[in-house]
Amino acid sequence: MTATRTKPLPDRVLGLIVDIAGWGAALSGLALVLVVGGNVLLRYLFNSGSVAMQELEWHLVSPIALMGMAYGMRHGGHVRVDFLYERLGPRAQAIIDLFSAVLMAILGAALIWFSIPYVQQSIMMGEGSPDPGGLPYRFLLKAFIPIGFGLMFVQAIAQGLVNYRQIIAEDDDGVRAFDAPDVPAAAHRVAQNGAGD
């Protein structure tokens, strides 16, 4: 049995959602490379081009950034001030991470709330490209805003659950250290490789 299967079901479900989004971001990155390469070939070898293909380049940046940010946070690819953080004990690190997860969840929820009317307006207008030959359905691109921050909210919940269990495990270790000195404290500690791993 793998270590992933021993994790609580909410961790696995939330982690899977974020991982699927990360795979979508990776596929969008591959598509972006192919589109840019195709545009360069069309422009310089065939002296041709397409407005829709040029717009598609920056349309693909939206899912890469907005779906990839939760994946990056889940797997530790985000920026952290490590020169202070790494000097702290596991409990202090878990408390800082829990506080960060709560702030991230609040930010994600706020951005979802404020972006939904913006996306709804775009859908009702049937917004597309103003350029001749451009891509229609620009509202689909704007829909990635609440989706991306929804994924960030999901990742914040997953991270918060892991950090909360770490803090509780550290508290239990302190109590057990007095009650049962024969039981090593490390046996009760919750390992963290990333929320939902």
Image (tube, rainbow, N blue to C red):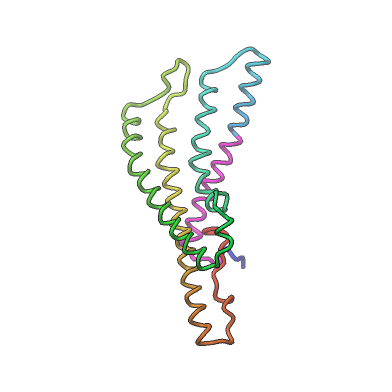
Q: Is residue 16 magenta?
A: yes
Who's the residue at 52% across and 32% down the image?
Answer: 60
Identify the image quadrant of residue 30: top right
In the image: residue 101, left or right of residue 88: left
Q: Check the image and report above or below for 23 versus 60.
A: below
Q: Which residues are magenta?
A: 5-30
Who's the residue at 59% across and 75% down the image?
Answer: 186
In this view of the protein, which residue sits in the foreground, 62 or 81? 81
Could you tell me residue 183's position as x and y percent?
A: 58, 84
In this view of the protein, which residue sits in the foreground, 194 or 29? 194
Q: Check the image and report above or below for 74 versus 44.
A: below
Identify the image quadrant of residue 149: top left
Who's the residue at 56% across and 63% down the image?
Answer: 192
Q: Check the image and report above or below for 92 versus 151.
A: below
Q: Residue furthest right?
A: 45
In this view of the protein, which residue sits in the foreground, 197 or 176? 176
| Main secondary structure of the magenta stretch | helix
In this view of the protein, which residue sits in the foreground, 175 or 130? 175
Who's the residue at 41% across and 37% down the image?
Answer: 143
In the image: residue 41, left or right of residue 89: right
Could you tell me residue 83's position as x and y percent?
A: 59, 56
Q: Is residue 91 magenta?
A: no
**Callout count:** 0
Could you tell me residue 31's position as x and y percent?
A: 59, 33
In the image: residue 44, left or right of residue 54: right
Q: Residue furthest top?
A: 47
From the image, which quarter does the N terminus lie in? bottom right
From the image, which quarter does the C terminus lie in? bottom right
